[in-house]
Amino acid sequence: MLQTASDVNPNGNDNNTQRPSARIILLPTQLDAQMQAFADATTSGARSFACHVYEQGGRTHLSFSLSLTVLLELARLQTAEAKKNKSNADELINRPIIRPHVEEIAKYLLETDNYILPPFIFNTNTPIKVFAFGEGVVKFGYAVISSNVELYVTDGQHRLEAIKKVLPEKPELRKDSVTVLVVQEDDVDQIHQDFADCAKNKPIPPALLAAFDVNDVLAKLTRDIAKNLVIFSGRVDKISKTIGKDPNYLFTMNQLKIGVAEFLFGSSRKQVIESRSNLSNGEFKAMVERAETFYMEFAKNNEIWKLLLQPASQTANLDLYAFRQQRIDFLTVGFQIISRVGHRIFFGQEFTYAQKETLIKALASLDYGRDNPLWENTVVIDDGSGSKKIVTQTAAVDKAVKVAINEVRELTGINLL
């Protein structure tokens, strides 16, 4: 708990010796706290850092804002090695470094100017002396950190390694700072629990990630399409993981993103999408225009999709769940098939406007019913009890795309391969 100056034992030990705790010395004013900290640091060869002091979960927490340079100077890692520490990883503070995760963060820092990093959490088993002032539950103070105080990373080792990696390439990051929370703790089990508790935040659902991640080029393209096209506007669930039985929504944001990837890049595989991440503004605008043209033309020429040309507010009685039970084009796999054939039409060969129009009409005229033998043993199989089961594997989608391309060729005489 927070102590006044009179509460602190002169020999530097807390009255409660069972657990380490920050040694908080409360003083009347900020000037008093600042002068005492400066004097203490000067005489002991330590460094003084401004911080906020508060209680949480029975422990005193210190919150700092540190430059990246100082962060790297102070942070210590005690990382388990995947091969070396198989049997005693629980005795070390940090889990093994996951290099792909470090690379992912490093790439983000290099490519994103307005980046954001969550706070780091450190622990120390050496009490930190803090000269503080204030009457509220959150106090301001000056922490004196001497050379014998070791600050080990509880949460943030991958961010720390990524910063080390990118600084030679992006030295201007040294001017930036981060938030660091220091918790007094010497129990390794509790340190591990602190890390586990930090990881209990629910991951962002794919739909929300597609809706919120402005640095993801594909997500940005998908948001524009969802907003600009009447067939999708108001019919895309931007929160849920799945649509379920909801009759009002066509796709989740993530499902729409998968289909848009198929149209734009000819694939929704992660490696293909990442290879196209550095689009210029001109390419971005051109792709959105082509996607909007394709999906609108498809809807105009398909008897069922034509119903979506009216705003969602005017088609409240349209049961999209029923369509999902009857058809494949209202499911992700069907949308993938349509979109990938669309990619062949707009990006595969140099077709004339009239040829594109003919090809889209042919694609829209196909029967996308689950019972159509056209899709049997590709994305639709008989489950043995008379029901038609949807298959979502990549190989099944690839096979169905070939079927669709062959059908379009039969109808138009134009080869898309």
Image: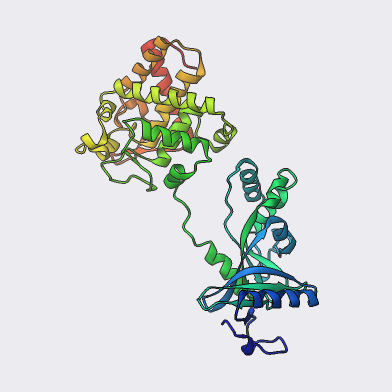
Image vertical order of residue 194 relative to residue 160, above or below: below
Pinpoint residue 320: horizontal percent, then vertical percent: 26, 37
Residue 95 versus residue 132: which sits nearer the camera?
Answer: 132
Residue 396, image quadrant: top left
Image vertical order of residue 264 relative to residue 205, above or below: above
Residue 151 visible to the viewer: yes
Looking at the rendered structure, the number of numbered marks drawn on it comes to 0
Q: Residue at x 73, y 46 (%)?
A: 171
Residue 417 versus residue 343: which sits nearer the camera?
Answer: 343
Pinpoint residue 9: horizontal percent, then vertical percent: 67, 90
Residue 131, image quadrant: bottom right
Residue 266 visible to the viewer: no
The color scheme shown is rainbow
Pinpoint residue 297: horizontal percent, then vertical percent: 34, 21
Residue 385 versus residue 55: which sits nearer the camera?
Answer: 55
Task: Work out which quarter of the rendered image holds the N terminus and state it.
Answer: bottom right
54 left or right of 172 in image: left
Pinpoint residue 339: horizontal percent, then vertical percent: 42, 27
The outermost residue toward the left is 317
Q: Residue at x 68, y 57 (%)?
A: 67
Image vertical order of residue 69 relative to residue 258, above or below: below
